[in-house]
């Protein structure tokens, strides 16, 4: 009965693509918009303290709208598609066959409570459904509220994130795949890697959905 009602509602209120408003496929992310995302090569986008960082694509057009929709506009259903893009790219890498423990960059608990969800937790969970990997959303925590990084200079970013993260345990499954939505200078990843290193965790790879088209002040 519930399925019949859902189909009836879908028929009456056709799902339209969030990105182009097309109703042809009755989906929130049509194949034309999905296929418009161009993946980077299967090489690390950069290295931070020797750790390889991979990026799926640029933060523009459909990808920018996708990330902002999930992060700021409560479009939680789109988390699956962000995870799908990340996983489709991830499968092109030689290392994807290893059994990773997936950990998202954490959000401070008060912000997550105010928003009523953590967008990267949603993406992480969907990514692990696709990959079959285990995930850990509790061991890596953000100790305090931090200012938005995009508003800050390089020195301010480092100061903003100093001692902002910690691990609640050190005996974690390795290798670890650290995931995030956007990386601009790499400061967030760099700060988290310091915490891993202090706990003797060295087998880490990072994967982000997007990077700016004109990156500046990368931390290598």
Image (spheres, grey):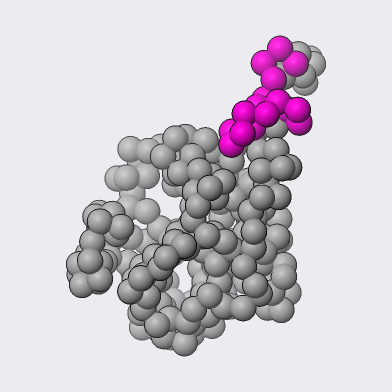
Q: Residue at x 55, y 72 (%)?
A: 54
Within the image, what quadrant is residue 8 found in?
Answer: top right
Q: Residue at x 66, y 38 (%)?
A: 29
How many numbered badges does the structure rendering display? 0
Q: Is residue 21 magenta?
A: yes
Magenta stretch in the rendered image: 11-26
User: In the image, 44: left or right of 14?
Assistant: left
Give the residue drawn at x 76%, y 31%: 25
Q: Is residue 112 above or below residue 90?
A: above
Q: Nearer the viewer, residue 174 or 64?
A: 64
- Residue at image location 45% in from the left, 44% down from the top: 68
Query: Residue 66, percent across and down?
Result: 53, 44
Please state if 177 lies on the left or on the right of 151 as rendered: right
Query: Which secondary structure class fits the magenta region best?
Result: loop
Q: Position of residue 183 (x, y in %)?
A: 43, 64
Is residue 162 among what the camera can see?
no
Magenta stretch: residue 167 in it? no
Q: Is residue 75 above or below residue 99?
A: above
Q: Quadrant of the C terminus?
A: bottom left
Q: Is residue 203 above or below residue 207?
A: below
Q: Where residue 47 appears, x then y in whole percent?
A: 47, 82
Residue 143 position within the rendered picture, expressed as x and y whole percent measured from the top left: 28, 60
Q: Quadrant of residue 218?
A: bottom left
Which is nearer the eye, 189 or 18?
Answer: 18
Give the side of residue 26 with respect to residue 147, left or right.
right
Q: Quadrant of residue 20?
A: top right
- The quadrant in which the N terminus is found is top right
Is residue 119 something one can see in this rendering? yes
């Amino acid at each position: 009965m519930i399925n019949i009602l859902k189909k009836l509602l879908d028929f009456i209120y056709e799902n339209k693509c969030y990105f182009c408003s097309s109703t042809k496929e009755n989906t929130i992310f049509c194949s034309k918009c999905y296929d418009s995302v161009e993946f980077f090569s299967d090489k690390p986008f950069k290295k931070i303290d020797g750790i390889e960082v991979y990026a799926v694509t640029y933060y523009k057009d459909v990808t920018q709208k996708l990330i902002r929709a999930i992060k700021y506009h409560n479009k939680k259903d789109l988390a699956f598609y962000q995870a799908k893009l990340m996983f489709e790219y991830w499968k092109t890498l030689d290392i994807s066959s290893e059994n990773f423990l997936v950990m998202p960059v954490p959000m401070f608990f008060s912000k997550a409570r105010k928003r009523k969800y953590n967008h990267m937790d949603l993406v992480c969970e969907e990514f692990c459904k696709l990959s079959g990997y285990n995930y850990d959303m509790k061991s890596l925590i953000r100790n305090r509220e931090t200012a938005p990084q995009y508003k800050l200079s390089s020195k301010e970013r480092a100061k903003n994130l100093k001692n902002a993260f910690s691990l609640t345990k050190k005996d974690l499954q390795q290798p670890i795949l650290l995931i995030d939505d956007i990386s601009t200078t790499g400061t967030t990843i760099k700060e988290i890697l310091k915490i891993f290193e202090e706990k003797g965790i060295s087998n880490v790879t990072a994967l982000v959905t997007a990077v700016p088209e004109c990156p500046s002040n990368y931390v290598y």
